[in-house]
Image (cartoon, grey):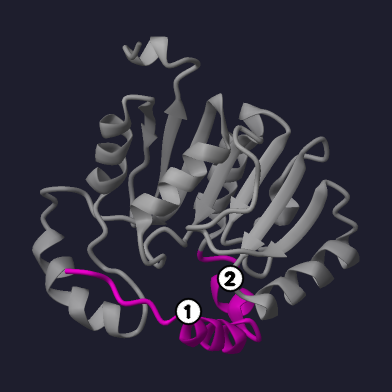
Amino acid sequence: MPTTYDLEGQKRIYATWAKFYDRIYQRLLARPQREAVAAACACGPDILEIGVGTGLTLPYFTPGSRVLGADLSLDMLRVANRKVATLRLGHVRGLMVMDACRLGFAAERFDAVTAQFVITLVPDPEQALAEMDRVLKPGGEIIVSSRLVDDGGLLAPLWAGLAPLARAVGWSSDFKVSRLTGWAAATGRYETAHVGRGYFKVVRLRKLASAAAAGRP
């Protein structure tokens, strides 16, 4: 079924969340966020973080990084900008309002693209992944951290049953790991480098160094 997407409605929700987001999520999400940032930094200095929000992850990047952050919510980005100024995060080179499905960057611009706790919320995850692919250099990684469900896991039926309720409040309870790894395999340009375990997972998709390496002409 097609996904309806109330862009302005989401912006209003994020405007409210921006006021107390850090107090709720800073400790809860620190482990997967730090893991995702470390993987991104290992790929190279030029990094895009999609769904940067209030900038919870920004202090985790190495000083030699050159980080750009994009988010749908201007209210969230205002909090992130204050954080950059207060903590003097010189590695953050810019924060901008942008839709994950329509990234305003040139092709093959970044060594790594991270999407932290946002892939389950965008209207078209495959389109968002395609945009990440477009702006990612060969040899780089798309690094996703989120609440992801193991295929065939014991609790999979429960999460599937809760999906309509979760969608009603703009969340996702049944976004499966295979939706990411399946996309990667279907492109012929990616390999799955890592799938984490636990309630919050980090999934790393590595872009092959050349089309020839992917078995393409």
Give the answer, above or below, for where 99 lies relative to 91: below
Q: Quadrant of the C terminus?
A: top left
Q: Which residues are magenta?
A: 1-28
Mark 2, secondary structure of its residue: loop
Give the answer, above or below, for where 10 lies relative to 133: below
Q: Which residue is mark 2?
A: 72
How many residues crowd mark 1 within 10 Å: few (<14), some (14–19), many (20+)?
Answer: few
Q: Which residue is mark 1?
A: 7
Dot 2 or dot 1: first in sequence order is 1
Q: Quadrant of the N terminus?
A: bottom left
Write down the quadrant of residue 194 in the picture: top left
Q: So how many labels did they put on this image?
A: 2
Amino acid type for the residue under numbered disc 2: Leu
Q: Are marks 2 and 1 in contact (CB under 8 Å)?
A: yes
37 in magenta: no
Q: Is residue 181 left or right of residue 45?
A: left
Mark 1, secondary structure of its residue: helix
